[in-house]
Image (cartoon, rainbow, N blue to C red):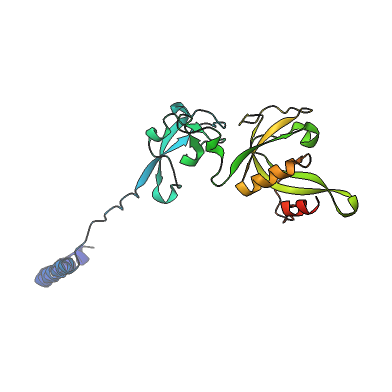
Amino acid sequence: MATAWLRLRAFVLVNRWILLAALLAAAAAEATLLALHPRTAAVPAAPAPGVRLAVLTRPVGPDQPIPASAVAWQTYPLRLVPPGAIRSPAALAGAWSAEALTPGVPLTAAEVFRPREANVLAARVAPGTEALAVPVSADNAVDGMVSPGDRISLYTTVTGPGGHPRTVQVFRELPVLAVDGSLSPAAPTPGRGFTLLLALPPSAVTELLYIMQHGPLTVTLDGPSPAPKPAPFGQAQWENLH
């Protein structure tokens, strides 16, 4: 062991200047590399810009006031902001729900209205349509089991060639705005007639008024179906039978 140590000491003493020169050369090379390729500190990425949006914390039924206690303000990335999203408390002041609202998703202007600024019913009528009241009996309307928000089809009976009566569909998938003046679903009233408030294009309003003058209507509830449906019986066909 002592012999090995003496040999190492002798080597260092003899070659100390060579070893020092190697260390200085390595340091110079490192300095040159740093000068040519300076190290830059990692800059953290800036957070994506966000927007504070109104989000319900609990469900709100249709045609109900939206209290401030039921609203939270959450930040969403710009790419997730839906069209018409409500971005300020002022936009919700005095607002009511135009439909049943679900918590946890951003509120939009199309989902609210202000009774002081617009008629409650007018706020529910889609652009390009008109509201029409259609009285029906319970026997002709699913025993009174129709509620606002449902979609219905209308049928009537016509007299075909040879005097044979047949039932035809005149309209389908009509949205029900109200039942007996109520815009919200209520308890069913089996066995009693009622008045439906329907939304139709102006041309369909005149057609339905014409058909109502020539016989009673039968109402059926529409269900979701991907199958194509035949075209309804039109006014021109109706007029050809009379």
Relative to residue 12, is residue 202 depicted above or below?
Answer: above
In the picture, residue 18 is in which quadrant? bottom left
**In the figure, is residue 98 to the left or right of 227?**
left
**In the figure, is residue 42 to the left or right of 30?**
right
Where does residue 113 sit, x and y in percent of width and height? Answer: 48, 35
Where does residue 233 sit, x and y in percent of width and height? Answer: 75, 52
Residue situated furthest left in the rendering: 17
Residue at 16 percent of width and 70 percent of height = 29
Where does residue 41 sit, x and y in percent of width and height? Answer: 23, 56
Q: Nearer the viewer, residue 91 or 82?
A: 91
Q: Nearer the viewer, residue 56 or 94?
A: 94
Q: Nearer the viewer, residue 73 or 9?
A: 73
Where does residue 105 sit, x and y in percent of width and height? Answer: 49, 40
Relative to residue 38, is residue 222 depicted above or below?
Answer: above
**In the figure, is residue 121 to the left or right of 55?**
right
Relative to residue 150, is residue 25 depicted above or below?
Answer: below
The answer to whether one can see residue 96 in this image is yes
Residue at 72 percent of width and 30 percent of height = 194
In the picture, residue 3 is in which quadrant? bottom left
Residue at 46 percent of width and 29 percent of height = 116
Quarter of the picture containing the N terminus is bottom left
